């Protein structure tokens, strides 16, 4: 599914930006982190980066055009994606598409809004003139089109540090990935308003950068109260609180830091600089971060450094000798605490919200069918003799479902309230279990892909999901979802519909069971599937017809190869 790129708010006073130049053109392939354009604000010229992989499908404003904050300036997606709907929504909805400078006199008139608010200051109790304060507020940016809040995973700079434009200030976890928050200005980090682990809504104040000694408290007092109240720990914390947090952080380092020294590679003030994902993977593999050379900014250790690291005997031995330290905690045979409470991750929050909405708004009904998998098992053996990649039963299920959806387009649909969307593309979402919950990467146009192509893509997407490398283009645009728990020994289950799909298919394991064939009892290999349907869109007869076709495809697998 195509992703809209909007003009970001690159400073606290920015209301619009001028496109200084486009560094990419329509049709170019772009990757996450690529610079799309240079944007001139009221303070500096900055780089606009892409957060998605894909093809640049649309550019709205031209070089030199003035564009209001949050206006649509570009669209990135898969080559051939239909973006007409996105452009129509942008023109009619909340976020207007950017227009050429000569066609938008209104944004120019609205640009002086900050000055107007100062003129109206007497009506506001806390509003003061901050124009002379040489500091700027940093707010939580909207890092994807669907992001509403982010968790501040870690601060990579501390209060008092000098920062330059482009320096990474912090790492932010969204519901899908962990991303870096960069500074857009040079100066000193004067204030941090949230702690590591805090959940922060988009546009809430999180930090202030400016000239050393600047009266940043006036900026906080003048910030929108609604945004201040949204911050989990409260934006109104003073200098003393921030300073005490910094001192406490230095005195009580995390578990990884206790075995690291100031002389270690990538360290600063005795602490190892590493991304959260790098720390996590290093811990899982038993690696000592102090032995790993960082290739990131300032010697910071990133995931690729951990993945390419070859441990020596010393860190391995350290990991072994460290293990017995945990023994006293369980020596008595009983846990010391009655329970443990863990903060809900962004991913889990989104899963809870979306599935609760689905379960309690979409009237679910369920259709279960048994499928004879004898021929499918034989076909898989033959296919894997010639396939460049190993084809799994799940790959066969995906291909059969895609072929069946082609014959039953009513199942490949979405409920939109006052209308039903019948999707012409068949994009199969494949549920993948990860540490924090569940992700659903998408195999696009699955009906046109070979089994080996599907197998390779599913393997690649599954790897990206577990290492948190998926991009929005990988998980958006599903029209039908498959959840397979057969590999865990589950024979049968029901799944909650994954919006905006009208159906989801739950796939159980293949089990040997007595079956009757030609009047005789034989041992057969049977797989149960359950189709969850949104009754607003799909009726029982429609869902049943789809399952019958799906069953015929797997019981005669040559049909899915044609």
Image: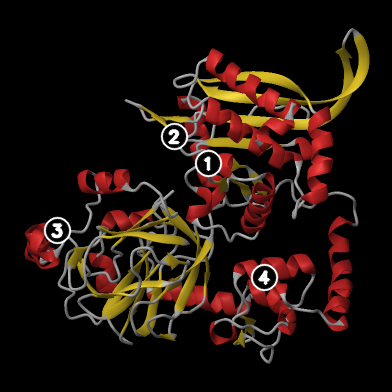
Location of residue 382 in the rendering, given as x and y in whole percent from the top left corner: 82, 42
Residue 234 versus residue 562: which sits nearer the camera?
562
Looking at this view, name the residue that lies furthest to the top: 519
Location of mark 4 (residue):
279
Residue 105 position by quadrant:
bottom left
Which element carries disc 4, helix, strand or loop?
A: helix
* Number of numbered markers: 4
Distance between mark 1 and mark 3 Cα atoms: 52 Å
Badge 2 marks a residue whose secondary structure is: loop
SS for tag 3?
loop
Instruction: Write down the residue under mark 2.
Output: 423
Residue holding disc 3: 124
Marks 4 and 1 close (CB-CB < 8 Å): no
Graded by Cα atoms within 10 Å as few (under 14), some (14 to 19) or many (20 or more), the crowding at tag 4 reads: many
Mark closest to the chain's N terminus, 3 or 4? 3
In x, y percent, where is residue 321?
A: 89, 74
Work out how far the residue at label 4 is from the one at label 1, CA to CA, in angstroms: 35 Å
Rendering coords of residue 302 (x, y %): 62, 75
**What residue lies at 47% left-to-right and 77% top-to-bottom?**
168
Decide which of 417, 223 is in the foreground and name it.
417
Secondary structure at numbered mark 1: loop
For disc 2, the neighbor class at 10 Å (few under 14, some 14 to 19, many from 20) is some
Q: Bin the neighbour count of mark 3 within 10 Å (Cα to Cα): few under 14, some 14-19, many 20 and up.
A: few
């Amino acid at each position: 599914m195509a992703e809209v790129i909007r003009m970001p708010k690159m400073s606290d006073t920015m209301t619009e930006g001028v496109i200084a130049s486009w560094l990419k053109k329509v049709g170019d392939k772009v990757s996450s982190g690529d610079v799309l354009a240079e944007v001139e604000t009221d303070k500096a010229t900055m780089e606009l980066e892409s957060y998605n992989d894909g093809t640049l499908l649309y550019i709205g404003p031209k070089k030199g055009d003035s564009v209001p904050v949050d206006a649509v300036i570009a669209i990135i997606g898969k080559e051939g994606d239909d973006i007409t709907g996105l452009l129509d929504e942008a023109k009619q909805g909340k976020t207007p598409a950017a227009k050429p400078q000569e066609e938008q006199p209104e944004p120019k008139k609205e640009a002086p809004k900050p000055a107007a608010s100062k003129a109206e200051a007497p009506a506001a109790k806390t509003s003061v003139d901050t124009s002379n304060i040489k500091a700027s507020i940093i707010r939580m940016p909207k890092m994807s089109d669907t992001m509403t809040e982010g968790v501040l995973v870690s601060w990579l700079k501390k209060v008092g540090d000098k920062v330059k434009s482009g320096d990474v200030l912090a790492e932010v976890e969204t519901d899908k990935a962990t991303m870096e928050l960069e500074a857009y200005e040079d100066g000193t980090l004067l204030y941090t308003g949230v702690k590591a682990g805090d959940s922060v809504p988009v546009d809430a104040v999180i930090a202030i950068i400016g000239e050393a000694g600047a009266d940043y408290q006036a900026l906080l007092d003048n910030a929108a109260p609604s945004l201040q109240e949204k911050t989990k720990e409260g934006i109104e914390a003073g200098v003393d609180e921030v300073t005490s947090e910094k001192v406490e952080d230095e005195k009580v380092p995390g578990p990884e830091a206790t075995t690291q020294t100031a002389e270690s590679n990538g360290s600063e003030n005795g602490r190892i600089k590493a991304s959260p994902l790098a720390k996590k993977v290093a811990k899982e593999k038993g690696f000592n971060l102090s032995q790993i050379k960082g290739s990131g900014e300032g010697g910071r250790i990133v995931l690729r450094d951990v993945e390419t690291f070859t441990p020596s005997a010393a860190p391995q031995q350290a990991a072994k000798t460290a293990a017995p330290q945990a023994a006293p905690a369980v020596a008595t045979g009983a846990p010391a605490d009655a329970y443990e409470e863990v903060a809900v991750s962004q991913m889990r929050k989104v899963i809870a919200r979306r599935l609760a909405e689905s379960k309690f708004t979409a009237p679910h009904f369920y259709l279960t069918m048994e499928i004879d998998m004898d021929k499918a098992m034989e076909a898989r053996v033959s296919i894997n003799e010639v396939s460049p990649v190993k084809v799994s039963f799940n790959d066969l299920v995906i291909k059969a479902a895609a072929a069946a959806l082609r014959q039953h387009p009513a199942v490949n649909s979405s409920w939109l309230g006052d209308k039903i969307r019948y999707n012409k593309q068949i994009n199969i979402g494949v549920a993948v279990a990860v540490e924090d919950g569940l992700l659903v990467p998408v195999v696009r146009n699955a009906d046109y892909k070979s089994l080996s192509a599907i197998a390779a893509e599913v393997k690649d997407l599954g790897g990206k999901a577990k290492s948190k490398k998926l991009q929005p283009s990988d998980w958006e645009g599903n029209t039908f979802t498959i959840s397979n728990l057969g590999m865990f020994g589950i024979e049968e289950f029901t799944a909650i519909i994954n919006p905006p799909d009208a159906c989801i298919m739950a796939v159980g394991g293949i089990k040997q069971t007595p079956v009757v064939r030609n009047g005789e009892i034989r041992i057969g290999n049977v797989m149960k599937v359950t189709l969850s349907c949104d009754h607003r869109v799909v009726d029982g007869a429609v869902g049943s017809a789809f399952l019958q076709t799906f069953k015929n495809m797997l019981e005669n697998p040559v049909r899915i190869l044609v």
